[in-house]
Image (cartoon, rainbow, N blue to C red):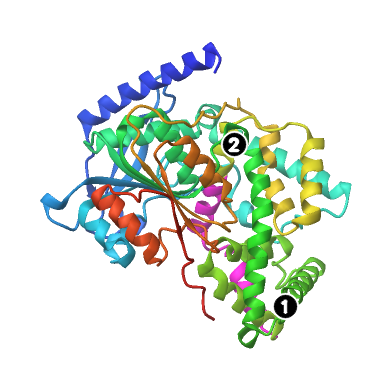
């Protein structure tokens, strides 16, 4: 880092220490959660104040929403707070304590020992939420086909991306937008730690939450007791975030094919063809139909992709997506419209979707320098689309606001092992689409003493929530005793979904 940026980070580290000391004194005023948050007793909610800009710790403050449920075991069994982030960027962690109230069996042992703590990161949900576009406008359908047919299509998409970036500035304001970064969220997490009255936290991060964990572990290595990261973003500076998104395009294609193979194998249930190629032909047929005449007037190629991409993301979507796909070709188009069209009457849900996308964009665009040359975007995505057409262009347009981003883009933290960092447990499936396997290998290299559990021949994004005793038992052992295997471990995959 240049002396300049180092001085900036020193100032922010000092600001974070001031904010943490202040939060430790203030604590958290825990109350029953607001009725409309959907978090029933005994989950409790509260707020933690953090500086908008850590270089100015006495300047403007924002309030972050935090919730918790106490450990279910005895006071003697308690091992502290387990803080969670589900990813995004833009995801809310507030549902985490509900794993205890819903008696989720995978987490029952850990719940005996830990308070489960969730939070809305800055800009998200109930934590000074940001916005880039009118939410009803954001969800409106049908949108343009993400796959361009012409230069005119590309020009139209570029205009939309530029307008979106401008909208973020207009609706969120420069001061807030400039501070929407992963390092700031990591500092926020340390202020939350202090407000909880903890010297060290235990942390579980999934997806983007692994990058938040990696940055937290780099900035505050002595403030972590135990850490699990699941489905890992490659934290190398050159991967954040332009390359990371190109890598996703390749991995999504692979997982999409895995799903098509499964649909073909279960042709008795779905009747979409007995080979991957046959299922792909049906997908292309559906896409072409929706392009010519949006299904139900609202479901075009873009909306189809929004629905179908949950299959390569999560195994839990394999049956529901295949079922809707199958029904369409059996003559039931309504199931597809219900599944893929926006619900314009769900204003709260639409506000939440728009907010999630705004935070995703703000954090990824502000965290790192992005290419500003359209020629580069065009060449890279045209090349990838030739071999990996499932997600490439759609992903490009989602990220293109970063090319004309209206606030200063930062330099990502150099993720590395610092004094006091404990042994970190890394969990990753080999065929993950959203966070390709290489990311886990890279973080494993950077965090000395870490252990890697590989779920082989599986690809569901987010592994620790699934039933796989080979993994679940090791997660429990680590969180309950601190023990890790002497070497890295490979586990067989969790059960394949059954139609």
Crowding near pointer 1: few (<14 within 10 Å), some, many (20+)?
A: some
The residue to which callout 1 is attached is 275
Q: Residue at x 59, y 71 (%)?
A: 339
Q: Is residue 322 above or below residue 459?
A: below
Q: Is residue 43 left or right of residue 259?
A: left
Mark whose residue sits in front, 2 or 1: 1
Query: What secondary structure is marked by label 1?
Result: loop
Query: What secondary structure is marked by label 2?
Result: loop
Q: Name the one closer to the observer, 485 or 252.
A: 485
Q: Is residue 269 above or below residue 2?
A: below
Residue 147 visible, this angle: no
Place of residue 200 in the rendered image (x, y in percent of width and height, measured from the top left) = 27, 36
Q: Which quarter of the picture shows residue 310?
A: bottom right
Which stretch appears magenta? 331-357
Place of residue 332 in the rendered image (x, y in percent of width and height, measured from the top left) = 66, 83
* Dot 2 or dot 1, earlier in sequence: 2
The residue to which callout 2 is attached is 240
Please say whether residue 207 is one of the residues in the magenta stretch: no
Q: Residue at x 29, y 36 (%)?
A: 193
Place of residue 263 in the rendered image (x, y in percent of width and height, measured from the top left) = 64, 77
Q: Residue at x 38, y 34 (%)?
A: 188
The C terminus appears in which quarter of the rendering? Answer: bottom right
Q: Name the one closer to the observer, 490 or 409.
A: 490
Q: Name the one closer to the observer, 148 or 318.
A: 318
Q: Is residue 159 left or right of residue 91?
A: right
Place of residue 148 in the rendered image (x, y in percent of width and height, measured from the top left) = 82, 53
Please say whether residue 338 is one of the residues in the magenta stretch: yes
Q: Is residue 172 left or right of residue 116?
A: right
State how far apart marks 2 and 1 are (Cα).
Answer: 37 Å
């Amino acid at each position: 880092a240049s002396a300049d940026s180092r001085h900036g980070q020193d100032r922010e580290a000092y600001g974070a220490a001031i904010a943490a000391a202040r939060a430790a004194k203030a604590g958290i005023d825990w109350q029953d959660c607001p009725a409309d948050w959907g978090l029933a007793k005994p989950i409790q909610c509260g707020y933690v104040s953090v500086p908008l800009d850590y270089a100015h710790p006495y300047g403007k403050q924002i309030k972050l929403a935090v919730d918790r449920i106490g450990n279910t075991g005895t006071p003697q069994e308690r091992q502290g707070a387990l803080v969670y982030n589900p990813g995004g960027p833009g995801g809310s962690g507030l549902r985490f304590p509900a794993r205890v109230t819903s008696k989720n069996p995978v987490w029952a042992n850990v719940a005996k020992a830990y308070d489960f703590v969730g939070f809305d990161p800055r800009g998200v949900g109930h934590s000074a939420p940001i916005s880039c576009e009118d939410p009803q406008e954001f969800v409106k359908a049908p949108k343009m086909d993400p796959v361009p047919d012409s230069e005119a299509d590309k020009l139209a998409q570029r205009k939309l991306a530029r307008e979106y970036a401008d909208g973020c500035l207009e609706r969120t304001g420069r001061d807030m937008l400039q501070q929407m970064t992963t390092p700031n969220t990591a500092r926020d997490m340390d202020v939350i730690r202090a407000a909880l009255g903890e010297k060290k936290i235990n942390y579980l991060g999934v997806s983007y939450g692994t990058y938040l964990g990696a940055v937290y572990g780099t900035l505050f290595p002595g403030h972590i007791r135990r850490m699990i990261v699941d489905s890992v973003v490659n934290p190398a500076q050159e991967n954040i975030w332009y390359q990371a998104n190109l890598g996703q395009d390749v991995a999504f294609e692979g997982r999409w094919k895995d799903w098509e193979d499964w649909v073909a194998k279960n042709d008795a249930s779905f009747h979409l063809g007995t080979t991957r190629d046959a299922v792909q032909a049906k997908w292309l047929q559906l896409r072409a139909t929706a392009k010519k005449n949006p299904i139900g007037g609202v479901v075009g190629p873009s909306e189809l992709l929004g629905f179908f991409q949950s299959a390569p993301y999560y195994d839990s979507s394999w049956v529901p997506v295949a079922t809707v796909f199958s029904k369409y070709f059996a003559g039931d188009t309504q199931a597809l419209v219900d599944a893929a069209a926006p619900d314009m009457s769900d204003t709260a849900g639409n506000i939440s979707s728009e907010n999630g996308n705004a935070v995703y964009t703000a954090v990824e665009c502000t965290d790192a320098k992005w290419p500003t040359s359209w020629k580069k975007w065009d060449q890279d995505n045209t090349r990838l689309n030739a071999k990996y057409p499932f997600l490439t262009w759609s992903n490009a347009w989602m990220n293109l606001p970063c090319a004309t981003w209206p606030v200063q883009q930062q330099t990502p933290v150099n993720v590395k092992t610092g004094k006091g960092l404990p042994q970190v447990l890394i969990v990753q499936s080999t065929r993950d689409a959203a966070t390709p396997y290489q990311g886990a290998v890279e973080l494993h290299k950077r965090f000395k003493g870490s252990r890697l559990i590989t779920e082989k021949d599986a690809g569901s994004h987010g592994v620790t929530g699934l039933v796989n005793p080979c993994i679940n038992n090791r997660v429990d052992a680590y969180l309950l005793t601190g023990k890790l295997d002497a070497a890295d471990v490979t586990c067989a995959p969790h059960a394949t979904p059954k139609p």
